[in-house]
Image: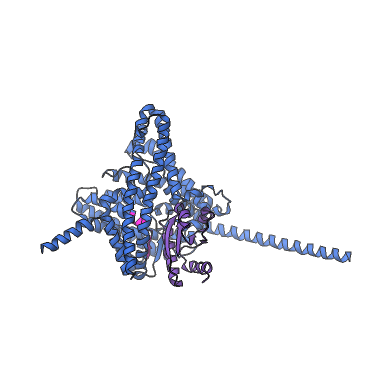
Chain colours: A purple, B blue
């Protein structure tokens, strides 16, 4: 499975988000490849990914995608990410 | 033993002196320490190496796109015009100073862990690109200051200063950060912090009774600037166009050779193309930064979690954006205005008088640090605070790079410089400390600078942060009262509605009764 984590520049908060998604995946024992992306690249990258993680403001900007978008309110909260992963993946 | 010397020489010159390999090794060590699988270690290290090499590829594109602009600005204004861009100056310096900066980065990180472990400044700075930029800034300024042959001293002093600034800045900003987030979970780890503190302090002065920005319904049309690729290309095209038109007006046909153009139309379109190519170059550099930070930061954080488990993570500035989405836009606009005002002051007075370069506004630093300043200003002073805070930030990130540019251009790095506030003041102070001929004096001054900052930070943490002091108590009370009043109104309104509904129901029931 491939997941992308999106922020404005793709080098700051998205990497924090990527690490926390990695942690959440490890807890859930799911194997996936997580990559950070900026919002420009994200629209293209999303087509080859299975899930997109971002904040609510950036989700509006990403617009309609075929890939499901998961909105995270607190990028540092592994618990929130875990919950939303469980919900999305039906674990 | 000759063969051993040869091998060591080979490793020193051909591997440890090549920044890309060095970064790869650092990442590999980090991943091994985290007990990752062999495949992950090799893959991570290789990606870090490739990411670093991509930096260089992007730097070439950016330099080509910047060259005509530099000539044009000099020709029409008589001063140097600079758009500070962290990624570009880092990529430019990476060839010569990359290896030293990689040593500073890794040793600085270790020292930061030690400071976080053994002093009250328990912050782990995790904003990787800013670590990389600061390490490069220190590497450049100190290498030149100490001269050749003293690389070990550059690395030691650079790592010490990097570690100090990485734990001190989050501590200094923390009272305001607590006001922004409303809790005490994360810290801000970004080298625009002087601007955020200034914005927070300004906010509490101007906006004691100013309502929050978040009550306004604000047009969301400027949000597209959050996309850094758009913001960079757009601002550079605009800057290019301004100077191209200015050039045509003031120089006439003499301006044409700057773009190698045959006529005015070709000249304008060539300048648009150069602006776009600048955006291309920055995107390539960012891709490189992303590729190696994606490997480096998780490795660093994994180590930090083991060494200082209870430390606070100090994170990049967009982490505060959700606490004031309108404030981000207000802060950006007023920061940009502040940048233009300071540009005017530089152009008319400070430039001619002191030979400072003209700092042109880059959208990316104004958006990210101006937006952050807006959020801090809003937290302490509502709408007026967000406006004034952004404005002050704009002044700072224009004047400070002008100082830094005069330090860095003195040592041959021209064309651009570092953009955010802390690079400006810290870089200038470090640069001034090592400007004399005496290495010993330089080291003493740097030690004084580092120790004063560290001691100040510890006192601040103990006396101010740990005692729970919060800025803008009056503003917070005002906001709370307002929210309470709103809530009361809402409750009252809800009660009225309920009564009305009940009355209606009753009336309907009565009507039914009469009908029956």
Nearest the eye: A59 or B348: A59
In the image, residue B86 sits, relative to residue A33, either above or below, namely above
Quarter in which the N terminus of chain B is drawn: bottom left
Q: Position of residue A52 (x, y in %)?
A: 48, 60
Is residue B164 something that shows in the picture? no
Horizontal relation, residue B469 to residue B220: left or right: left
Write the start and end of the magenta stretch as one range: B122-132
Please tell me whether residue B127 belongs to the stretch shown in magenta.
yes
Q: Position of residue B457 (x, y in %)?
A: 36, 60
As drawn, which residue projects farthest toward the top?
A: B253
Q: Position of residue B470 (x, y in %)?
A: 47, 61
Horizontal relation, residue B74 to residue A26: left or right: left
Please tell me whether residue B139 belongs to the stretch shown in magenta.
no
Is residue B321 something that shows in the picture? yes
Dividing the picture into quadrants, the one containing residue B291 is bottom left
As drawn, which residue projects farthest toward the front?
A: A48
Instruction: Give the total of numbered labels.
Output: 0
Residue pictured at 75% horizontal, 62% vertical: B501
Horizontal relation, residue B386 to residue B26: left or right: right
In the image, residue B402 sits, relative to residue B22, either above or below, namely above
Residue pictured at 38% horizontal, 37% vertical: B347
Dividing the picture into quadrants, the one containing residue B83 is top left
């Amino acid at each position: 499975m491939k997941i992308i984590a999106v922020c404005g520049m793709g080098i700051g908060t998205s990497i924090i988000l990527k690490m926390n998604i990695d942690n959440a995946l490890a807890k859930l024992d799911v194997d996936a490849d997580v990559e950070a992306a900026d919002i420009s690249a994200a629209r293209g990258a999303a087509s080859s990914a299975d899930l997109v993680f971002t904040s609510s403001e950036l989700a509006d900007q990403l617009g309609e995608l075929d890939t499901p978008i998961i909105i995270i309110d607190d990028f540092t909260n592994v618990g929130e990410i875990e919950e939303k992963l469980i919900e999305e993946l039906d674990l | 033993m000759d063969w051993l010397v040869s091998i060591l020489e080979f490793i020193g010159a051909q591997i440890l002196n090549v920044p890309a390999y060095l970064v790869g090794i650092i990442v590999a060590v980090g991943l091994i320490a985290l007990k990752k699988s062999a495949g992950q270690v090799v893959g991570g290290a290789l990606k870090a190496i490739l990411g670093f090499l991509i930096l260089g590829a992007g730097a070439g594109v950016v330099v080509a796109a910047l060259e005509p602009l530099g000539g044009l600005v000099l020709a029409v204004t008589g001063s140097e015009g600079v758009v500070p861009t962290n990624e570009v100056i880092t990529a430019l310096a990476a060839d010569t100073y990359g290896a030293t900066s990689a040593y500073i980065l890794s040793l600085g990180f270790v020292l930061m862990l030690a400071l976080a472990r053994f002093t009250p400044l328990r912050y782990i700075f995790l904003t990787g690109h800013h670590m990389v930029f600061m390490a490069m800034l220190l590497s450049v300024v100190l290498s030149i200051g100490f001269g050749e042959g003293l690389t070990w001293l550059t690395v030691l002093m650079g790592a010490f200063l990097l570690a100090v600034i990485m734990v001190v800045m989050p501590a200094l900003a923390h009272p305001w950060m607590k006001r922004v987030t409303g809790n005490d979970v994360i810290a801000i780890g970004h080298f625009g912090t002087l601007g955020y503190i200034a914005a927070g302090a300004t906010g509490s002065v101007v906006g004691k009774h100013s309502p929050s920005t978040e009550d306004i319904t604000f047009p969301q049309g400027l949000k597209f600037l959050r996309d850094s690729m758009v913001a960079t290309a757009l601002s550079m095209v605009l800057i290019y166009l301004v100077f191209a038109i200015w050039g045509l007006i003031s120089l006439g046909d003499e301006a044409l050779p700057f773009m190698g153009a045959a006529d005015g139309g070709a000249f304008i379109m060539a300048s648009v193309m150069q602006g776009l190519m600048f955006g291309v170059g920055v995107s390539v550099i960012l891709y490189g930064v992303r590729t190696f930070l994606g490997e480096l930061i998780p490795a660093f954080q994994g180590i930090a979690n083991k060494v200082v488990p209870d430390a606070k993570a100090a994170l990049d500035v967009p982490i505060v954006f959700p606490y004031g989405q309108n404030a981000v836009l207000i802060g950006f606009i007023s920061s940009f205005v502040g940048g233009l005002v300071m540009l005017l002051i530089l152009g008319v007075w400070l430039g001619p008088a002191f030979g400072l370069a003209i700092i042109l506004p880059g959208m990316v630093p104004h958006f990210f640090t101006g937006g952050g300043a807006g959020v801090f200003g809003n937290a302490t002073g509502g709408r007026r605070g967000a406006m004034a805070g952004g404005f002050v930030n704009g002044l700072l990130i224009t004047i400070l790079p002008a100082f830094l540019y005069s330090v860095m251009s003195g040592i041959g790095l021209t064309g651009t410089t570092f953009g955010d506030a802390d690079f400006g003041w810290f870089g200038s102070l470090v640069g001034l400390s090592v400007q004399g001929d005496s290495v010993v004096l330089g080291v003493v001054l740097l030690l004084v600078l580092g120790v004063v900052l560290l001691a100040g930070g510890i006192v601040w943490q103990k006396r101010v942060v740990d005692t729970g002091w919060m800025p803008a108590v009056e503003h917070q009370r005002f906001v709370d009262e307002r929210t309470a009043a709103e809530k009361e109104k809402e409750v009252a309104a809800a009660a009225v509605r309920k009564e009305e509904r009940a009355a209606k129901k009753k009336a309907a029931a009565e009507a039914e009764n009469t009908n029956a």
